[in-house]
Image (cartoon, grey):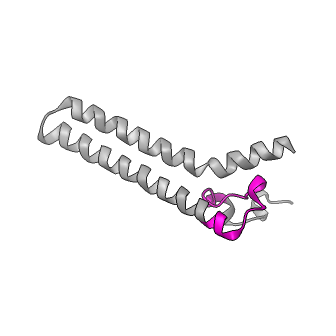
């Protein structure tokens, strides 16, 4: 009997921000740290955008009865969460593309 989840741990599943570095393996540790900081900062900005959109939707839908503000809030939520997903998966995408090229 062979278990599929026998290898790896939770870090292999949730390690999207810390990529395998594939083509960027030759970078120094300072450069890798800077890339990780920039990616983390971009994710925080996208999450803040999603929270701002949720607040705008809530205020526009209930307190002010402003449907335009509520629709803008929905757009900001989608844009923020999409940005988080794209930035979080960049390491995986780079590794896959680099692996296909090699």
Q: Residue at x 19, y 43 (%)?
A: 59
* Foreground of the two, 30 or 84: 30
Does residue 57 lie above or below 32 as drawn? above
Residue closest to the far top: 68
Residue 57 located within the stretch drawn in magenta: no
* Foreground of the two, 92 or 4: 92
Circle count? 0
Q: Residue at x 56, y 49 (%)?
A: 87
User: Does residue 52 appear to the left or right of 99 in the view shown?
Assistant: left
Task: Look at the image and give the residue range highlighted in magenta.
Answer: 13-33
User: Does residue 64 appear to the left or right of 81 in the view shown?
Assistant: left
Residue 73 in the image, given as x and y percentages of width and height: 30, 38
Does residue 95 lie above or below 100 as drawn? below
Does residue 48 appear in the picture of this structure? yes
Quadrant where the N terminus lies?
A: bottom right
Does residue 84 lie above or below 69 as drawn? below
Residue 25 in the image, given as x and y percentages of width and height: 77, 60
* Foreground of the two, 26 or 19: 26
Residue closest to the far bottom: 29
User: Does residue 82 appear to the left or right of 34 in the view shown?
Assistant: left
Does residue 10 appear in the picture of this structure? no
Q: Residue at x 74, y 65 (%)?
A: 8
Q: Residue 62, located in which quarter of the rendered image? A: top left
Residue 14 in the image, given as x and y percentages of width and height: 61, 59
Residue 28 located within the stretch drawn in magenta: yes
Quadrant where the C terminus lies?
A: top right
* Foreground of the two, 4 or 41: 41
Q: Residue at x 36, y 40 (%)?
A: 76
């Amino acid at each position: 009997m062979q278990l599929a989840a026998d290898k790896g741990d939770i870090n292999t599943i949730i390690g999207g921000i810390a990529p395998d570095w594939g083509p960027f393996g030759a970078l120094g540790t300072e450069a890798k740290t800077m890339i990780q900081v920039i990616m983390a900062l971009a994710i925080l900005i996208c999450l803040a955008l999603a929270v701002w959109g949720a607040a705008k939707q809530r205020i526009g839908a209930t307190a002010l009865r402003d449907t335009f503000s509520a629709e803008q809030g929905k757009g900001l939520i989608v844009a923020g969460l999409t940005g988080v997903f794209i930035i979080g998966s960049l390491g995986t995408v780079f590794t896959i593309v680099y692996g296909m090229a090699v």
